[in-house]
Amino acid sequence: MSGASVDPWLAGVDGCAGGWAIALADRNFTTIALRHIKSFAELFSHSEGPGLAAVDMPIGLPEQTGPKGRTPERLVRSLLGARQSSVFSIPSRAAVYAGADPHEPNERTRFLRACDIARATSAQGRAVAKQGFQIFPKIVDIDCFLQRRRDLLHRVFEAHPEVAFWRMNGSKPLAEPKKIKGRLSQVGIELRARLLVGAGVPAATIDMALPRPVARDDWIDALASLVVARRLARREAISFPSPPETDRLGIPIAIWA
């Protein structure tokens, strides 16, 4: 699916194994389709792409970071209760790019280099969290794309699924985790599925068979981002911070819900 000259299609995007899981839908959620792409640029490779895309991935990278990461991360953690550990502290652009350097095949070397740069460019001299390090290549993927396609800065927005679910849950943190010790929690998945249905996502869409390598939690998170994309389209979304900050390259820094 792709948009016409305006914005009939919305996209909810989540990073997954081998690329990105995309939930594409019209504004009324009457048709929702799944697509798996290898690079973020593929989302806009046909026609003009979706009118709005909400992406579960940090967008906008500072040159220096304050305590506990970027401003959006510091603001949303306090909302999420026990789920706040899902919000990683993202270091400076230089640290992220060092950690994702395609010319350095040794992961440990990349990690240590990223840690050194992160310490030198953070207010508290903090290194890199291992979980955050794992998503650096996808952060670079979308960052490079937006540097090339600045015309899309008003159509691509950062989201975070737990913040999206927080808002779907009446601005209350979710009591149940999505995963326990790396394995899906059936109770947590069912809770999020109920919130998605309450937000207008058909139950059959949530439970649809998924192609590899898209996992169930990837699809749940893509659908949560899709709900944020519809809020953005309807001008009902809120941002942390408000208004968004911008990085040195003019890319907005904010989590939307």
Image (tube, helix red, strand yellow):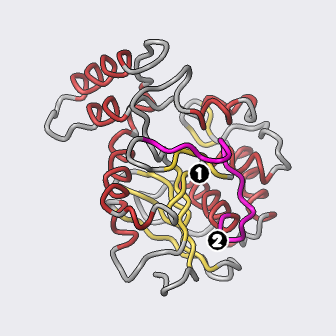
Would you place residue 208 above or below residue 196 in this image? Answer: below
Q: Nearer the viewer, residue 95 or 195?
A: 95
Image side of residue 192 versus residue 116, left or right = right
Q: Nearer the viewer, residue 104 or 255?
A: 255
Which residue, as the protein is rendered here, is positioned at the far top?
A: 125
Mark 1 or 2, nearer chain start: 1
Q: CA distance from mark 1 to mark 2?
A: 20 Å
Would you place residue 206 above or below residue 77 in this image? Answer: below
Label 1 vs label 2, nearer the camera: 1
The stretch in magenta equals 232-247
Q: On the image, which quarter does residue 84 sit in?
A: top right
Q: Position of residue 128 (x, y in %)?
A: 41, 23
Residue type at mark 1 is Ala
Q: Residue at label 1?
A: 159
Residue at (82% x, 45% y) in the render: 171
Image side of residue 13 versus residue 102, left or right = right
Q: Position of residue 20 (x, y in %)?
A: 42, 58
Label number found at residue 205: 2
Residue type at mark 2 is Thr
